[in-house]
Image (cartoon, grey):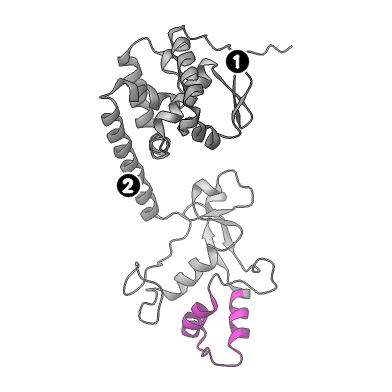
Amino acid sequence: MFSMAKVSIGSFYEKNSIRIASGLSFDEEELLLPLILDVPATDRDFRKKVSEFYQDIDTDVPYEAGIKLEIGLKKSNEKELAKDNLPLEIMEYLRYRHAIKHPKVALSKDLANGNSMKEFYVFDPKNVQAKNTKRNEEKDAAMQIYLEMKQEAGKVDMMLTLLGIDPREFSNDDLRLEALRQQAENNATRFIGVKEEGELEVRYWIGSMVNTGVLKPIGNKYTDAETKAIIGNSLEETIAFFKDEDNSDKITVLKALLQEALKKPIVPKKRMTQVTK
């Protein structure tokens, strides 16, 4: 029964308005609707006719197959809608522009998933291809960063730390390299983001000091675990502290504590479980 069912996208009001929505701007309405209504935009009844048209619009969407709409423009899809760049199929274009503004329509399947307000979603193969292309480009960029960093063990440790992985978890350089490679392959967007944040070395010191207990984070603050003194009220302030030459003596002490702490074996994290009756 579902496979034979039809649902439709009908009229709706613009947000916080009593105006029937078209999904178009006023200029776009004046450009396109005269071609459908056979009423010039200068006619005194034009706005009334537009409202009536969108009051009655109803786009049937077969349950399984959906509906395909031609939304291409005659001259170029890369250029804006214009008098010399009209839709190939005006009515289908109008249905599409109306539908994508409808509160029950999501612009992609991902956005529709888990949203009980959405009953329809737009599938555009071009967007899927663009998403795949971007994903592949990010993977290539992440692997390029990995290949540059693998030449220096210090940078491998830095990157792992900033990705939330304590390098001491691995018994040798090969395992650390493998862990970094997996991050580049599986979390390319985050991998690139960490690199592009900059201040790699300073953020590594802070991350390592937190991992080893030299610094203690309390909310957004970072404190000296030994003296309880506040190093910075935020990560940004803490980075500034480490870059300030006036703090060189204190930083030297913290780095010495870090070196001692790194020599100690990593304390395994407790694994919690819950027993219920």
Counting labels gives 2
Residue stretch in magenta: 25-54
The answer to whether the residue labelled 2 contacts the one labelled 1, judged by CB atoms less than 8 Å apart, is no
* Magenta residues, dominant SS class: helix
Q: Residue at x 54, y 79 (%)?
A: 26
Q: Amino acid at mark 2?
A: Thr
Q: Quadrant of the C terminus?
A: top right
Reading the image, the residue beneath label 1 is: 226
Reading the image, the residue beneath label 2 is: 133
Q: Residue at x 29, y 38 (%)?
A: 140
Answer left or right for 85 relative to 251. left
| Residue 9 percent across, percent down from the top left | 58, 63
Q: Residue at x 39, y 40 (%)?
A: 196
Q: Secondary structure at mark 2?
A: helix
Q: Amino acid at mark 1?
A: Glu
Q: Nearer the viewer, residue 144 or 257?
A: 257
Tag in front: 2 or 1: 1
Q: Nearer the viewer, residue 124 or 153?
A: 153
Q: Earlier in the sequence, mark 2 or mark 1?
A: 2
| Residue 143 percent across, percent down from the top left | 29, 33
Q: Which mark is residue 193?
A: none
In magenta stretch: residue 33: yes
Q: Is residue 29 above or below residue 249?
A: below
Q: Residue furthest bottom?
A: 43
